[in-house]
Amino acid sequence: MASAETAGAGTGRTVTTDIPARLDRLPWSRWHWTIVVGLGTVWILDGLEVTVVGNIAGRLSEPGSGLAISSGQVTGVAAALYVAGACVGALFWGRLTDRYGRRKLFMITLAVYLAATALTAFSFEAWWFFLFRFLTGFGIGGEYAAINSAIDELIPSDYRGRVDLIINGSFWVGAVGGSLLSILALNTDLLAADLGWRLTFALGAVLALVILLVRRHVPESPRWLLIHGRDREAEEVVAGIEERIEAEKGAPLPAPHGEITIHQRRTVSFAEIGRTVFARYPKRAVLGFSLFIGQAFLYNAITFGFGAILTAFFQVPSGHTGYYFAVIAVGNFLGPLLLGRLFDTVGRRVMISSTYLLSGLLLFGTAWLFDRGTLDATTLTACWCAVLFFASAGASSAYLTVSEIFPMETRAMSIAFFYALGTAAGGISGPLLFADLTGTGEVGDTVLAFCIGAALMCAAGLVAAFLAVNAERRSLEDIATPLTAVPGKPGPAAQNGRPDVTPPSSSPA
């Protein structure tokens, strides 16, 4: 329960509450599955969208497609605009998510994504296609900030790591679907050349509409409500969740342990966000930078030129590269699915550093085998699968990390900032570097591309080995004390017999 220690309504009050502890002690239930489906499945759409566009680029440039555009414009200009939209959207919506709430923003950002995707299907000129690719990215960038912050604040601490990893890794389920769907869409025996690609975008819009309907049942984060002076609403939300879960389990819930005292407020300035991330938590900022940059360059080293590599070195027909990509995408999803639980049991530091280091070392090994000429298309794809099995778990943990290691009031903006940084590095500097290397047709240049990605991934793994935060099975308020927490008041960890590791008056790493 929440109790006000000073009189008055709304913000400006000091409140002692056990709401975070009550959320964290909940057993897994059907209600939590509703959260996963309502919030997490949008990454499947993102994976489908990105993969389909890459695979249908050739069809769009053909006569009779109904759109006067070149393949280079689709994979170059349109892809860059999508990336730019995602970066701008993450920062724009991230700020609003921290200020106006998780629920309001994840409804708006999905609506933007839905509308932009649907309107892309009606493209009649290149400028229209470019505009709505940017707006699609603008919506999906906001989803990363709003969704990851909401999920981490609603999922119990014992399950937060695995759930976050699997949800972020579900991008690759969409990538598998996108690869197979593009094969169907490009089959002119089934669909006209000017219709098939349009239907793929229309399908994405329909799926987004279904997810939007499910999201209506997802509540606002009680943690956000509590800090923003709406503790009565927070109490109602948590009490409703507890009633549903008790009815499902047929037994009373265990008693919560721990309270936190906060001074409610509505907004946090950009200056305070900057001081928090870079002055109060400088080592954590370095960790976030390292994880996002490492995974961005590794993925570009492999995926940016994968089709060209298969075609140039192993004579795989361009129409068949989608099958190989589907196999790689399966490997990507299996990593978070099978390793996710270990992030909650073995621990964050061990798992983050080991997945980054293993993927980097395996890519070094792949580069060595490729240089020796001992690989064919099948064995190279198998090597990529092994690399990405670990890399995908590591990349997903980057989103988990920046979501849980900074205070509640800056959570969405922190996710947005590091996501925009990694996306820009991967979508701008990555392609500029790797396009020249993988496009030459020279074995040595492709080996160099692999080695650059592998080296940066290993470097990020070493940073994680020293700087990663042991956040497994801990309350978010324990990992990073809210900026609104009252100094000198015990937090959740202290009430459970552990010292609060990040008191507001200290300057933690």
Image (cartoon, rainbow, N blue to C red):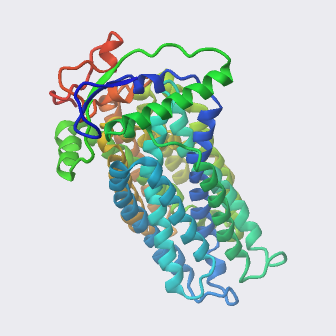
User: Residue drawn at (54%, 77%), measured in percent from left and top?
Assistant: 74
> x and y percent of residue 167 in the render?
56, 43
Name the residue furthest front. 8
Q: Is residue 438 visible?
A: no
Specify the quadrant that holds the C terminus.
top left
Residue 320 vs 324, above or below: the answer is below
**For residue 162, what is the image quadrant?**
top right
Q: How many marks?
A: 0
User: Residue drawn at (50%, 66%), measured in percent from left and top?
Assistant: 112
Specify the quadrant that holds the N terminus.
top left
User: Residue drawn at (44%, 65%), measured in percent from left and top?
Assistant: 138
Name the residue furthest top. 497
Q: Is residue 326 left or right of residue 257?
A: right
Q: Is residue 14 visible?
A: yes
Residue 286 vs 487, above or below: the answer is below
Residue 381 vs 308, above or below: the answer is above
Q: Which is more toward the observer, 243 or 399? A: 243
Q: Is residue 33 left or right of residue 448?
A: right
